[in-house]
Amino acid sequence: MIHPKDDVYERLAEHLDRLPAGFPSTATGVEIRILKRLFTPLEAEVAQLVTLRPEKAPRIAERSRWNPKELEEHLFAMSKKGLIFRIRKGSEFRYMAAQFVIGIWEYHVNDLDPDLIRDVNEYLPHFFHRKHQASTPQLRTIPISGALPSGQAVMPYEKARQLVRAQEKIVVAPCICRKEHQLTGGGCGKPMETCLVFGNGATYYEENGLGRPISTDEALEILASAEEHGLVLQPSNAQSIVNICTCCDCCCQILKNLKVLPNPGQYVACNFVAQLSESLCSGCGACAASCPMDALRLDHEKALLMPERCIGCGVCVPVCPEEALALAQKPEEERITPPAHLLETFKKIHGERMSKLKALQAQPGDKS
């Protein structure tokens, strides 16, 4: 069935909003402007046929009146444009929906333009607003290697280098956050080619020209460079990861929207928190300058730690010349065990979002 072009983007927006990460509507309609920049009306129709279950074109065609061969051509072309996701199994392809973030937006890292960047920057504060977000985030925060606590048992899924060494296929791609800032006259000058992608995602990135394959050794060098430049490590919120983002608080949309909250530490998935030995502190201020969440500041020539703002990244630890800072594991009752696989994470996020949405719909007059 072909629907009127006028509402195809509204229906696509609703389709994306039913995915775990969501795509909440706004009063201004900026989310529809974004979809019109990315999808033709025909592509917007086809995108609504795919789900988070990878499927071959003939199976997807069964839910529509499309000829399987013709549909395959459209699905493949859309997957090359970064509008849906594609998994290759030998000579066959399976197609699945891509979430807006993390997904469609990141897949456009190499074809950004000022108008799209402007609209997405207008939209993302709304997207990341706490009332639209699940309690479980898509990404978690793990310590940089130089901040891992000694003498404490640290789980393998919390060690960045161990996570990288476990991967068979690795692709590195540009950081879309730093790139879009650079393209609009901003940017922080920190390394650009830093986003690590693994497994099927790595294959998709390589085949779509979004990144280049690298060795394990080069990936470890990228982690070392990230630590040197004070970047926050954010892998998938699962024990079996599909990516590691290396993020700065000046460009990363996730960190920027966390930073405006009074208690960022409450909203991240991390099992560590900074500890300060005041007697060792010389008041140099290096830690306060490095902290991406302003969890440290100088007070009467001494560092003051606000643990409710700490996200456990460990960026502050190696910059302290007096070794006055260290990471410690949170109390056992506060620690989080990531789901084994990302699909479990998505199921959890979806359930939390649906519960929150029902609660919002029960509040008269709250349509934002």
Image (cartoon, rainbow, N blue to C red):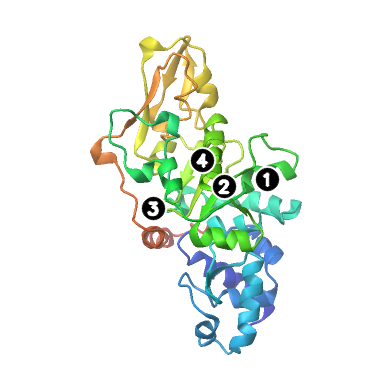
Report the mark closest to the observer, 2 or 4.
4
Residue on which disc 4 sits: 220
- Left or right of residue 42: residue 346: left
Instruction: Give the residue number, with chain letter if any, for mark 2.
Output: 195
Looking at the image, which residue is at 47% across and 69% down?
52
- For disc 1, the marked residue is 179
Where residue 141 appears, as percent x and y from the top left, is 43, 41
Query: Taking the image as drawn, is residue 104 in sight?
Result: no
Q: CA distance from mark 2 to mark 1?
A: 12 Å
Identify the residue at horizontal 65%, vertical 65% (top origin): 35
Identified by mark 4, the residue type is Leu
Separation of disc 2 and disc 4 at Cα?
12 Å
Q: Determine whether, in the image, residue 107 is placed left or right of residue 183.
A: left
- Label 4: how many residues lie within 10 Å, few (<14), some (14-19) or many (20+)? some
Check disc 2 and report its element: helix, strand or loop. Answer: strand
- The tag earlier along the polypeptide, 2 or 4, is 2
Answer whether residue 230 is visible to the viewer in this image.
yes
